[in-house]
Structure formats: C-alpha cells, structure tokens
Amino acid sequence: MRHVPFSFELHPARSPLIAQQLPGRIARLAAAGPEFMSVTYGAGGSSQGASLDVLRLLIDHHPEVRTMAHLTCVGSTVQGTHETVRTFLDAGVHSFLAVRGDLPAGFSEGAFPGDLRSGAELVQLIHAVQHERTPWREVPLPGTRGITLDRDGRERIVIAVAAFANGHPSSRSVEQDIDTLLAKQAAGANLAITQLFFHADDYFRLLDRARAAGVEFPILPGIMPVTTLPALARSLELSGEPMPSDLAAALDAETTSEGQREVGIDYAARLAERLVEGGAPGIHLYTRNLHETPLAVLARAAFIDATRYSELVAPDFAAAPLP
C-alpha cells in the first residue's frame, strides 16, 4: 500500500444530536492518520465560537493531527478578524484557510460587505497578526554596526487559499482565476485547496495553467463523496459546478440507498486514484461531518489498509475518553 497524504474538512455541528456524535466521528477520522483536519467558519464570524470548540477538541484530544482554521472575508472587519486570528493562534492553531466567502443574497460585487474584499487581503492580515504575536528576532551580526532580522525564532504557519478547477462562479475568465491565485501567492499563501469537482481532467487543466503562469505552491484537490441524487443537486447548487452526467446516471440507475452509496464511494475513490497517479500532492476530503463514507473512499483507493478501515468503522472502536 502506497503512502498518500490525505486530510479532512469538518464543520461545527448544526444540531444537538450531531454535536453529541461529533467527538466520536472525529476520533475515528483522526485515527486514520490525516495530514491535517480543517474546520469551517461562518461568514462574519457567525460560528467562531463553535469552530473554536471543534479546533480545541482536536488540539486537546488529537494533538498528533495538525488543525486548520477557516477564515472568511464576507461581513468581517479588520479589527474583528485580527482578534479572531490571534485567538486561534493562542489556542494552538497554526494553519489557516483564507477564503473570501460567498456573498449574501441581495449583495453585488460592487457592494461587498466587510473591510476585507479578497482572499489575498486576508492572507496578508494573517501574516501581520502572526508577525505582531511572534516578532522577528533581532540578532546582531559580528563585525557590523547594524542589526539584521532572523526567522529562526518564528513559528511557521500554513496559509491555504481556495482554488477552483472549473473557475470561480463569479469569475469573468480562466485568466482571472489564475491571476487571483498569483495575487494570493504574492500575499504569502503557501497552499491551495480546490473546491469540489468531479473529473480529474478539470484539476489537471487548472494545475497546468497555474504552473505555466508561475503559481508555485501545492494545489491540493478537494473531493466530496456524493452518495445520493439530492446530495448531488445540493452540491452543484452550492459550488456552481457543471452536472457530472456520468455520476448522475450511475446514481439514478440504483434503486437502493446502499447501491447509491456504493456508486458514490467508488466514484470518489476512482477520482482520487487518478488524481494521485497524475501527480496530485494528496487528497482533501469534504466529510460533511461523517466518518464512514470518507474512510470507505480511502480504503477503496487503497490509501488506508482495509483491516484498519474495518477497525475504524467498527461499533466497538476504542476512542480516547472525552470529559
């Protein structure tokens, strides 16, 4: 079995039942050995407290897993975002996903709500807060009168940004999307994660264009296993992606929920395999706060051992006790 880096996205629980189940699901995902686990964040800080609770659960009970906090621009102020970044850093979070976020209904591009208008501006702000919190260390150089600045005493943080295999829904052109990635790189981003897509060629076209234009940071493909037709429709509505007719037809041909689940798992696993074979640096899975389906995708693609998968989804899985 080959080693393939993978990671998971979580979001704060939206119901008391999910909140009760989430620690156990997180424990199973963490035990699979992800490179990191990211936690989404509502526009304007609407879920800051809930996001921080999930991040602290990961930090306190699964310290072996790097945590990544999402941050959004929409509806955010510079001062509020500054305080949020510092709060996350103080809690032990050293990775961020900086995204502009979707505009609320009724707002146009010309009436953007909030002080920060782009992912690149948010990247710059995160770096500024980190610099204030852990300043450059001043080191005198022998034989000189001046002072130089040394990076050795400063924590390394990962700042990821969003990429779009088929273009951002509000983008005017493919060139604009690549220019946006270049702006984020210039601002200090060092990783990109794509929003969901359904065909490997879409990712490879994005990668070729980005590299040709000078984008150097890794671009991690994001995959959402879709196991029902309603879930597919919802995913397309949120992402603006074109209909994957092959997946839709395969799901429609199945008459049972278990059959549709198998179709979705197999489709996502084959997509992940092709991406990695084509040179993708790993796989980022959008979990929808589930554990069995994303773990099944990893096992089907042979990114985790089948025996380990059986242990992780077993009813008697032994997770670390939580208070």
Image (spheres, rainbow, N blue to C red):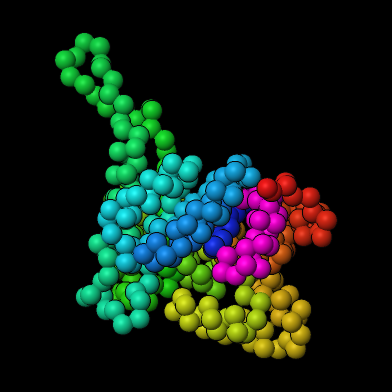
In the image, residue 157 above or below residue 81 = above
- Viewer-side residue, 48 vs 161: 48
Report the number of discs: 0
Task: Let me know if residue 22 is in the magenta part.
Answer: yes
Outermost residue toward the left in this view: 145
- Viewer-side residue, 214 vs 11: 11
Identify the image quadrant of residue 64. Answer: top right
Determine whether, in the image, residue 82 is placed left or right of residue 144: right
Identify the image quadrant of residue 12. Answer: bottom right
First to last magenta residue range: 13-34
Q: Is residue 30 visible?
A: yes
Task: Let me know if residue 267 is in the magenta part.
Answer: no
- x and y percent of residue 104 in the render? 35, 76
Identity of the residue drawn at 41% across and 47% down: 87
Determine whether, in the image, residue 275 is placed left or right of residue 86: right
- Viewer-side residue, 286 vs 5: 286
Determine whether, in the image, residue 155 is placed left or right of residue 323: left
- x and y percent of residue 181 in the render? 34, 60
Q: Is residue 241 visible?
A: no
In the image, residue 196 above or below residue 123 = below
Identity of the residue drawn at 44% across and 79% down: 240
Outermost residue toward the top in this view: 143
In the image, residue 194 above or below residue 234 = above
Identity of the residue drawn at 33% across and 54% down: 81
- x and y percent of residue 209 in the render? 37, 63
- x and y percent of residue 152 in the render? 38, 27
The rendered magenta stretch, by its main secondary structure, is classed as helix
Identity of the residue drawn at 57% across and 45% down: 59
